[in-house]
Amino acid sequence: MSDSTGSDVARLYKREFAAAHIIAGHPKCGRQHGHNYTLLAKVYGSSKAWLDFEDIKRKIDGLVDERYDHRDLGNMTCETLARQLQEQLSNLFQTRVKIELWETGKFGVETV
Ligand SMILES: [Zn+2]
């Protein structure tokens, strides 16, 4: 089944990165701390089209390395970070992108 944009598959790319943040007012996360995030990006498209996995890797790694890895993200929650990554990657690939962003092995956010 394809949707209105012709997407019937999502290419997947997963990578990890480390970053610090602080959630003001939170009893525990109000202290600055870090996470080893796992990002799973789903880049939607048509199964009839050809998309280079290496190109996906290069673009996502480029963005993450430049803006997020080993950075202080300030007062950014997992939710806002996932939405920001979704917007930036959608612009980069010019197609629908969904994000899973895992803050720990147990907790994460999925854009919808
Ligand atoms: Zn945290």
Image (cartoon, helix red, strand yellow):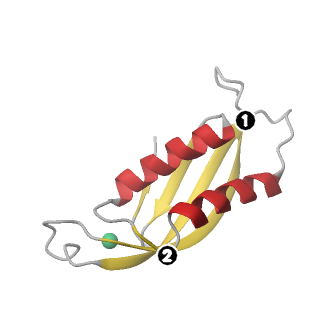
**Distance of label 2 from label 1 (alpha carbons):** 31 Å
Residue at (60% x, 66% y) in the render: 65
Residue at (65% x, 56% y) in the render: 60
For this view, does 89 lie left or right of residue 111?
right
Task: Name the residue that disc number 1 marks.
Answer: 45
Residue at (70% x, 54% y) in the render: 59
Other-residue count near label 1 (Cα within 10 Å), few / some / many at <14 / 14–19 / ≥20: many
Mark 1 lies on a secondary structure that is strand
Residue 55 drawn at (x, y percent): 79, 53
- Vertical side of 96 occupied by 51: above or below: below
Residue 96 drawn at (x, y percent): 61, 35
Ligand 1 sits in quadrant: bottom left
Q: Amino acid at mark 2?
A: His
Task: Name the residue that disc number 2 marks.
Answer: 70
Mark 2 or mark 1: whose residue is earlier in sequence: 1
Residue at (66% x, 23% y) in the render: 5
Q: Quadrant of residue 8?
A: top right
For this view, does 35 lie left or right of residue 76?
right
For this view, does 8 lie left or right of residue 18?
right
Other-residue count near label 2 (Cα within 10 Å), few / some / many at <14 / 14–19 / ≥20: some
